[in-house]
Image: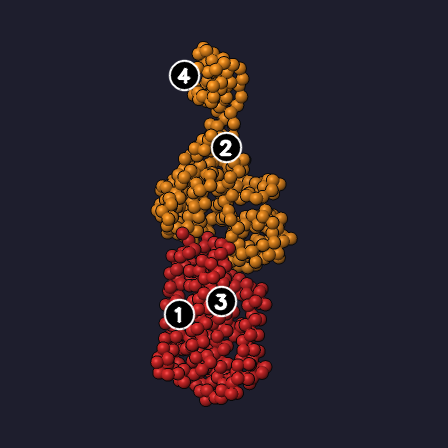
């Protein structure tokens, strides 16, 4: 199957010698809803900037729907719609004009652009604001305007860089609904977000970027399964022995009375029996944090 | 390609007409007053220059000065603001060729130069009977001047990193060049050394040709002037295109 996005050995070193991306390999299938996670400075925006031709890469290859960005730049640009993290429109332009102009840059004539802008502005609940200067919009409205602008030329791939930053819960949910609809219609969506809940709720596949390197790329299901894989915190009645026994499952000491166990092929009863045989009597069992966040922090070495 | 070009031009025109109180009205008023006071009142004491009265002598140069200032101001402010508020990214992510971006911005500068220049011409016509010796020379000189200074403004905007950077060049380079380009005097009255030095100032050729179009007299061969202006345009166009393509101060 043709990949929507295929990145090989992508490296970016800025003029100050700061290496933002280091031989990154990444692929996103067509029709996917893909999350690109990473903490601040991980290299997400740099990667998006390169894909969207806003930044020059140092080396590597970017293929968009099989087209090499270096050789077919304009074709590649037509296939991508970008909603950036920072507001990047002229605040002194009217809302509708921003969309119509953007369409014009893609060669769409003014009347078709106006018709498409009307559909998008209505969908984004911005139609009443179409004649207002963009600067007068609220933060959430500005984000929706940028989403509408990213879609004005009907791209095949939509890249969203922190789309719901500063957007209230209600609008965020309605934006998610809209994004799901677009994805259901076949649009490939690549999302970077700080809201792990957003990635968990929307995306099927995920990559985690840390210090310019991909540290994980898998399906959301597998990733969540790994996190929820019977990671339990067990608390003992008595102080734990200095040396923990070696068993069929992983044990980590948390403090003098508690351990964390990661259960793979054994269930909790078997684990408790095995511990008891080693003179560790457990009084209390609880789940460790069962969220994507746990794994994210672990993979990006930020866990306390 | 054509739609993208048209979009940029229309956007540029809408931009400066939306703020006409800042962009069109003041230069028309101040230049007209300038002309009437310096040319009309003080000109009577100066007498004739290059065979015509002083007011008629300075009108072409003053009109051209507004064209220079406004063509330059339009591209420098528009492109710098696009960089400043990152709206330049709208163009960079879309399949618009660098030539089209450059042409679009230059065309915006030409239109503003034309609108303001025409405004001054019309305003002055209410007070002075204007004659045009050859409209084609007038239009050709206007066009080359507007292109040249739109390009210069564009290059300034590419390098500018702050609002100070877009006012330094007009104040410390453009203004002295304009005043020393023979707008208020005929270069023929200068000592030989200064006459020679004036020939290194491109504004001298523009003013001389423009004046030729209005009055029918010039101090330099028209073809030489056109050649100088065309050569400078070609050089600046190549530089501007190179800077844009390389993404200097636009892409990292």
- Chain bearing tag 3 is B
- Chain bearing tag 2 is A
Residue holding disc 2 = A293
Q: Residues within 10 Å of mark 1 (few under 14, many from 20)?
A: many
Q: Which mark is residue A243?
A: 4
Q: Secondary structure at mark 2?
A: helix
Residue placed most toward the observer, B186 or A123: B186
The residue positioned 45% from the left and 82% from the top of the image is: B185
Q: Residues within 10 Å of mark 2 (few under 14, many from 20)?
A: some
Residue placed most toward the observer, A19 or A219: A19
Residue holding disc 3 = B73
C-alpha separation, residue under disc 1 versus residue under disc 3? 17 Å
Chain B: drawing colour: red
Q: Earlier in the sequence, mark 1 or mark 3?
A: 3
Q: Residues within 10 Å of mark 4 (few under 14, many from 20)?
A: few
Letter of the chain in orange: A
- Chain bearing tag 4 is A
Q: Earlier in the sequence, mark 2 or mark 4?
A: 4
Residue holding disc 1 = B233
Q: Is residue A279 left or right of residue B27?
A: left
Q: Which mark is residue A224?
A: none
């Amino acid at each position: 199957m043709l990949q929507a996005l295929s990145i090989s050995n992508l490296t970016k070193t800025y003029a100050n010698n700061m290496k933002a991306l280091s031989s990154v390999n990444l692929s996103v299938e067509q029709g996917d809803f893909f999350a690109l996670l990473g903490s601040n400075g991980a290299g997400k925006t740099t990667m998006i900037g390169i894909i969207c031709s806003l930044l020059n890469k140092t080396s590597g290859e970017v293929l968009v729907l099989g087209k090499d960005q270096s050789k077919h730049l304009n074709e590649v640009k037509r296939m991508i719609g970008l909603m950036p993290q920072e507001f990047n429109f002229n605040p002194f332009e009217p809302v509708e004009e921003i969309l119509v102009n953007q369409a014009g840059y893609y060669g769409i004539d003014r009347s078709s652009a106006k018709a498409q802008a009307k559909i998008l502005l209505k969908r984004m609940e911005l139609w009443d604001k179409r004649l207002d200067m963009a600067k007068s919009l609220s933060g959430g409205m500005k984000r929706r305007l940028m989403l509408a602008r990213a879609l004005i030329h009907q791209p095949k791939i939509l890249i969203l860089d922190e789309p719901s930053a500063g957007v209230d819960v209600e609008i965020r949910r309605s934006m998610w609904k809209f994004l799901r609809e677009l994805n259901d219609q076949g649009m490939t969506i690549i999302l970077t977000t700080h809201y792990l809940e957003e990635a968990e709720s929307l995306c099927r596949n995920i990559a985690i970027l840390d210090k310019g390197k991909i540290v994980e790329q898998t399906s959301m299901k597998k990733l969540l399964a790994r996190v929820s894989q019977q990671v339990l915190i067990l608390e003992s009645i008595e102080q734990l022995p200095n040396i923990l026994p070696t068993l069929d499952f992983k044990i980590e000491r948390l403090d003098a009375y508690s351990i964390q166990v990661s259960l793979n092929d054994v269930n909790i009863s078997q684990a408790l029996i095995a511990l008891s045989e080693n003179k560790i009597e457990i009084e209390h069992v609880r789940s460790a944090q069962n969220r994507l966040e746990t794994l994210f922090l672990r993979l990006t070495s930020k866990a306390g | 390609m054509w739609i993208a070009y048209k979009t940029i031009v229309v956007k540029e025109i809408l931009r400066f007409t939306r703020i006409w109180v800042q962009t069109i009205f003041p230069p028309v008023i101040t230049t007209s007053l300038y002309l009437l006071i310096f040319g009309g009142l003080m000109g009577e004491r100066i007498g004739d220059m290059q065979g015509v009265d002083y007011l008629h002598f300075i009108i072409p140069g003053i009109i051209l000065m507004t064209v220079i200032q406004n063509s330059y101001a339009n591209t420098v402010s528009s492109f710098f603001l696009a960089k400043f508020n990152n709206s330049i990214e709208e163009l960079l992510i879309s399949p618009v060729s660098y030539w089209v971006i450059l042409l679009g911005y230059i065309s915006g500068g030409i239109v503003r130069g034309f609108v303001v220049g025409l405004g001054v011409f019309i305003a002055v016509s209410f007070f002075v009977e204007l004659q045009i010796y050859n409209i084609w020379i007038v239009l050709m000189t206007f066009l080359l001047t507007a292109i040249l200074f739109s390009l210069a403004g564009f290059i300034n905007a590419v390098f500018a990193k702050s609002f100070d950077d877009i006012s330094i060049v007009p104040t410390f380079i453009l203004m002295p060049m304009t005043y020393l380009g023979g707008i208020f005097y005929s270069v023929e009255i200068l000592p030989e050394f200064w006459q020679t030095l004036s020939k290194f100032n491109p504004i001298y050729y523009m003013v001389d040709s423009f004046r030729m179009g209005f009055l029918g007299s010039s101090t330099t061969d028209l073809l030489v002037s056109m050649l100088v202006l065309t050569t400078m345009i070609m050089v600046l166009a190549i530089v501007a295109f190179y800077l844009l393509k390389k993404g200097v101060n636009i892409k990292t």
